[in-house]
Image (cartoon, rainbow, N blue to C red):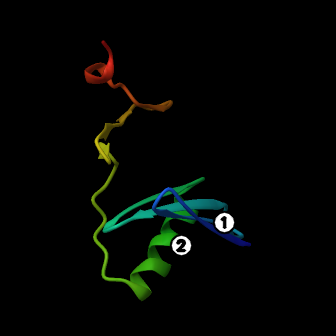
Amino acid sequence: MLKYQYLHGSLHISMVTDFGESITVIYVDDMLAAASNTSEMNCLMSNLHQVFDIMDLGDICWLLGISIKHDQVASWYPQPNLLH
């Protein structure tokens, strides 16, 4: 099942396959992809490589000026520069 919507200047795509679920967000020339497991991410990346010339930059650290941190359990979004 494939769902998509255009929201606040970006394209949001969600897909459910036999492997799991994935979400892709595209804003201008940046793309963020997330998947429920490694198999789904591999399937998503394979499909994208068939259509687009893309480069996997690894785990996300920044997106649209937002810092993103990771550990073994979770991801979080510390923004100390935004606190007054």
Vertical side of 74 occupied by 31: above or below: below
Pinpoint residue 11: horizontal percent, then vertical percent: 51, 66
Q: In the image, what residue type sits under mark 1?
A: Phe
From the viewer's perspective, is 48 left or right of 39? left
Vertical side of 59 occupied by 45: above or below: below
Q: Of residues 77 and 46, which is closer to you in this image?
A: 77
Q: Which residue is mark 1?
A: 19
- The reply to whether discs 1 and 2 touch (Cβ–Cβ < 8 Å) is yes
Q: Residues within 10 Å of mark 1 (few under 14, many from 20)?
A: some
Q: Which residue is mark 2?
A: 43
Residue lying at 45% horizontally and 61% vertically, measured from the top left: 9
Residue 54 has which mark?
none
Vertical side of 50 occupied by 72: above or below: above
Pinpoint residue 23: horizontal percent, then vertical percent: 56, 59
Residue lying at 42% horizontally and 87% vertically, measured from the top left: 51
From the viewer's perspective, is 24 left or right of 81? right
Instruction: Give residue 77's quadrant in the image.
Output: top left
Residue lying at 29% horizontally and 19% vertically, measured from the top left: 80
